[in-house]
Image (tube, rainbow, N blue to C red):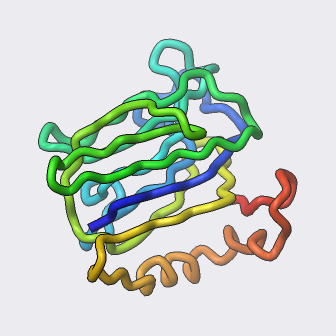
Amino acid sequence: AVTLYKVTAAFSGIVIEGAANSDRAGGYALLCGPDHNATDDFIGGLQFAADDDDPSIVNLRWLYSSRQGRLSATLLPDVNPDTFYTVEAKFHYDRREADVAVDGTYAITVEYLPRPLDAIRLYNFSNCTARFREIAVSLKPGDVYSWANTAQFIQDHQHMMDALSGGSDDDSAPVF
């Protein structure tokens, strides 16, 4: 079981005005379960998405799977483009809750459905481009994660990974 998930990301671009709500999402970084389906079989992760009322505003959200279905909660409203934010989730398997923070400040506690970690999926949607600087995952002692599915995803999307050889400053962070 995942105990900690930390990802540092930024976005550029905005979501197209007039798009349907489902198309207002931008970049994602999701922890996925064994079905490899980032929309139905995932644990949780960050999402840059347009505000429901004003699509020119982009919010940093936590997307998660619960008994009520796929949900999202705004972690930080009206985030700035090209600014890196660190989202850290501490998973409490016994309570089936995750405490989520942004840049070290507590944001929200959400329910989650525990499932085995099988892949980390990075996505861009609409005309939003997410860049990722750091991704870290910790598991319960004794649990094993095979990077095979993530490695296959990376191989399948090599064109998005070419920036990995760059440095760590804002201009050379990997673009996905």
**Position of 115 relative to 159 (above/below):** above
Q: Say left or right for 19 vs 111.
A: right
Q: Say left or right for 66 vs 63.
A: left
Nearest the viewer among 141 and 81 is 141
User: Which quadrant would the N terminus be assigned to in this image?
Assistant: bottom left
The part of the image, by quadrant, that contains residue 30 is bottom left
Provide residue 20's location: percent of width, then percent of height: 44, 28
What number of labels is visible? 0
Residue at coordinates 83% horizontally, 51% vertically from top-left? Answer: 170
Residue 106 visible at all: yes
Q: Say left or right for 4 vs 57.
A: left
Q: Say left or right for 11 vs 1.
A: right
The part of the image, by quadrant, that contains residue 119 is bottom left
Provide residue 144's location: percent of width, then percent of height: 32, 83
Residue at coordinates 58% horizontally, 83% vertically from top-left? Answer: 155
Residue at coordinates 56% horizontally, 40% vertically from top-left? Answer: 104
**Position of 131 relative to 152 (above/below):** above
Nearest the viewer among 64 and 20 is 64
Provide residue 105's location: percent of width, then percent of height: 53, 33
Provide residue 108's location: percent of width, then percent of height: 37, 31
Residue 24 visible at all: no
Residue at coordinates 38% horizontally, 85% vertically from top-left? Answer: 146
Nearest the viewer among 108 and 166 is 108
**Position of 164 relative to 56 (above/below):** below
User: Which quadrant would the C terminus be assigned to in this image?
Assistant: bottom right
